[in-house]
């Protein structure tokens, strides 16, 4: 059956445009090869370079300030204002740029729970971007999507803005317009801008209008139907620990928590490839096959075989694939409300317990903190462990004030009696350079114990500095590692470093204490 090209007249595109609509992955790969956008790796995956930008550009992400957003959005360095006039000006320039080109159009959706799904039309200048949209968004039957999508994304890496006239910071940009329900992306070929644009949209819509908590997290479900959620910033083990052979994957990155379920926003995964091996990440490794999209990876010289240890192009090498490429993924990606939540942190100071249990107030505090640490050598200029705080483990994607999301989390925890655990996947026995990274086998054992009731005992003690409840015993993990102070050679040095981190937590939290929540935010909190 030949697909009918949708009406794109609302985009003011010219008559010379060629529209490739709803191509299959095979057709998109053929188009990408024809356009010389990339090559096939030996695994069968399409491998492309995204150009100048190999990651998101947070300082070039804007939200149109209008009647919908002016008094609701958390404006600042995360959410940067742009006027409706500048948006319209860029929109006209961008559509004029595309008017004589070949474009790729895909209709899809987000949110696996049909009650909260939104339809999306993705219009891209390149075939590989459209393959990404196919892999990352949900792929419902076209008949269920209707004639016009709710949201439209236009992504054109070849279109460069003029900061002097267009209101942007530089030539690349990503702009969300909630009134027009449109996202414009230009000057960058990095596909993560497409994915995170819709995530930001859902982070605005779902809390305000549908009482859904959007979450930057992974999620899986056990054989007994118990759901677990894993929050964590880059390098904390979120993807690794949620990929449990004894549990089924709901999703690896973006979810919503409603009154009766947790559901995946996406239809695929966007996994990091740096240092990837079949032994460490067998599910991801096996998912890199025909239909998957590799970004910015290098090959072994003279071959088409990906060298995942080579990060000369970027440490942010990625692969995008449909969730069906993971053997134990559940479809549709919906499960029950969570029984356990894990906050993952890679503490390079070696002072946080490997696992501790949080009460509701502590959970809200650590959720707002979103702590991990960058270690020396990971980025130019970093010579010592560097604290990183990202509110709600996803500050860059929060259109509303973090309090909105934290209050929702606290309310849902109280209502559903959820257990929350803080898990340190970082260092023990000393800071980075002295101590050792917590063994993955021990971390897995602690998480397994939390999930199966192995930590449902009364043998806990309170940490002197952080006031966290630490289990004294955990199946399949040595007792001595559970109290981090006992792993240091010098106890006094341990507590000096622990108080240093505790002070950093308190200083970071002051930004929230000092914020005067507007009436609209207060109303939002009540709605939540």
Image (cartoon, helix red, strand yellow):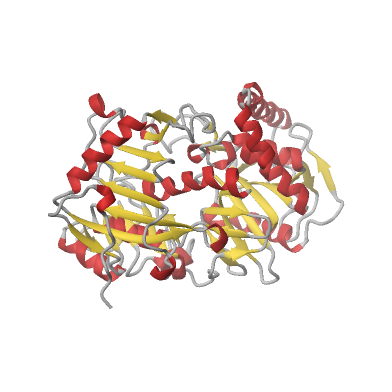
Q: Give percent across and percent down for residue 219.
A: 59, 58
Image quadrant in which you'd find residue 431: top right
- 335 or 501, nearer to the observer: 335
Q: Give percent across and percent down for residue 9.
A: 25, 53
Query: In the image as oriented, which residue stretches furthest toward the bottom?
Result: 1
Relative height, residue 138 to residue 507 (above, below): below
- 14 or 456, nearer to the observer: 14
Q: Give percent across and percent down for residue 39.
A: 22, 61
Q: Is residue 118 visible?
A: yes
Image quadrant in which you'd find residue 515: top right
Query: In the image as oriented, which residue stretches furthest toward the right?
Result: 458
Residue sitting at x 42%, y 53%? 150
Q: Is residue 350 visible?
A: no
Q: Give percent across and percent down for residue 64.
A: 40, 34
Relative height, residue 301 to residue 480 (above, below): below
* 177 displayed left or right of 352: left
* 20 displayed left or right of 209: left
Image quadrant in which you'd find residue 338: bottom right
Relative height, residue 263 to residue 71 (above, below): below
- 32 or 204, nearer to the observer: 204
* 513 displayed left or right of 47: right
What number of labels is visible? 0
Where is the C terminus found, in terms of image quarters? Answer: top right
- 378 or 397, nearer to the observer: 397
Where is the N terminus found, in terms of image quarters? Answer: bottom left
Residue sitting at x 49%, y 36%? 68
């Amino acid at each position: 059956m030949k697909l009918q090209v949708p009406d794109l007249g609302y985009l003011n595109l010219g008559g010379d445009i060629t529209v490739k609509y709803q191509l299959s992955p095979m057709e998109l790969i053929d188009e990408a090869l024809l356009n010389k956008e990339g090559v096939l790796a030996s695994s069968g995956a399409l491998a492309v370079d995204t150009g100048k930008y190999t990651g998101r550009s947070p300082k070039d992400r804007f939200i149109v300030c209008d009647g919908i957003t002016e008094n609701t959005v958390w404006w600042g360095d995360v959410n940067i204002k742009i006027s409706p006039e500048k948006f319209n000006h860029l929109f006209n320039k961008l559509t004029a740029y595309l008017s004589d080109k070949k474009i790729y159009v895909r209709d899809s959706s987000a949110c696996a729970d049909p009650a909260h799904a939104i339809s999306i039309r993705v219009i891209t200048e390149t075939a590989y971007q459209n393959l990404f949209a196919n892999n990352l968004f949900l792929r419902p039957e076209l008949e269920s999507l209707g004639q016009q999508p709710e949201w439209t994304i236009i992504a054109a890496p070849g279109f460069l803005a003029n900061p002097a006239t267009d209101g942007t910071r530089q030539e690349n940009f990503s702009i969300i317009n909630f009134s027009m329900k449109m996202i414009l992306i230009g000057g960058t070929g990095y596909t993560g801008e497409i994915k995170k644009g819709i995530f930001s949209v859902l982070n605005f819509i779902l809390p305000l209008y549908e009482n859904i908590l959007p979450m930057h997290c992974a999620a899986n479900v056990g054989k007994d139907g118990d759901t677990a959620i894993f929050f964590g910033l880059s390098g904390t083990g979120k993807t690794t620990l949620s990929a449990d052979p004894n549990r089924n994957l709901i999703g690896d990155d973006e979810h919503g928590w409603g009154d009766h379920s947790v559901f995946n926003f996406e239809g695929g995964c966007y996994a990091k490839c740096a240092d990837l091996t079949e032994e460490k990440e067998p599910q991801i490794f096996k998912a890199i096959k025909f239909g998957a999209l590799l970004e910015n990876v290098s090959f072994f010289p003279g071959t088409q075989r990906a060298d995942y240890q080579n990060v000369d192009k970027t440490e942010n090498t990625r692969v995008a694939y449909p969730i069906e490429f993971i053997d134990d993924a559940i479809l549709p990606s919906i499960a029950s409300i969570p029984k356990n939540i894990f906050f993952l942190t890679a503490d390079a100071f070696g002072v946080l317990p490997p696992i501790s249990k949080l009460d509701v107030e502590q959970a809200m505090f650590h959720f707002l903190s979103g702590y991990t640490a960058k270690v020396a050598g990971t980025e130019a200029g970093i010579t010592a462990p560097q604290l990183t705080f990202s509110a709600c483990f996803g500050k860059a994607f929060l259109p509303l004030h973090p309090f909105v999301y934290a209050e929702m989390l606290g309310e849902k925890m109280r209502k559903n009696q959820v257990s929350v655990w803080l898990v340190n996947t970082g260092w023990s026995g000393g800071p980075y350079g002295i101590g050792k990274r917590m063994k993955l086998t021990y971390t897995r054992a602690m998480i397994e114990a939390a999930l199966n009731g192995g930590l449902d005992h009364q043998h806990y003690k309170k940490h002197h500095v952080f006031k966290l409840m630490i289990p004294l015993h955990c199946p399949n993990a040595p007792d001595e590692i559970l109290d981090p102070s006992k792993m240091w050679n010098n106890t006094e040095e341990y507590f000096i470093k622990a108080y240093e981190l505790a002070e950093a937590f308190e200083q970071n939290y002051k930004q929230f204490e000092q914020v005067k929540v507007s009436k609209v935010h207060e109303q939002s909190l009540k709605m939540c």
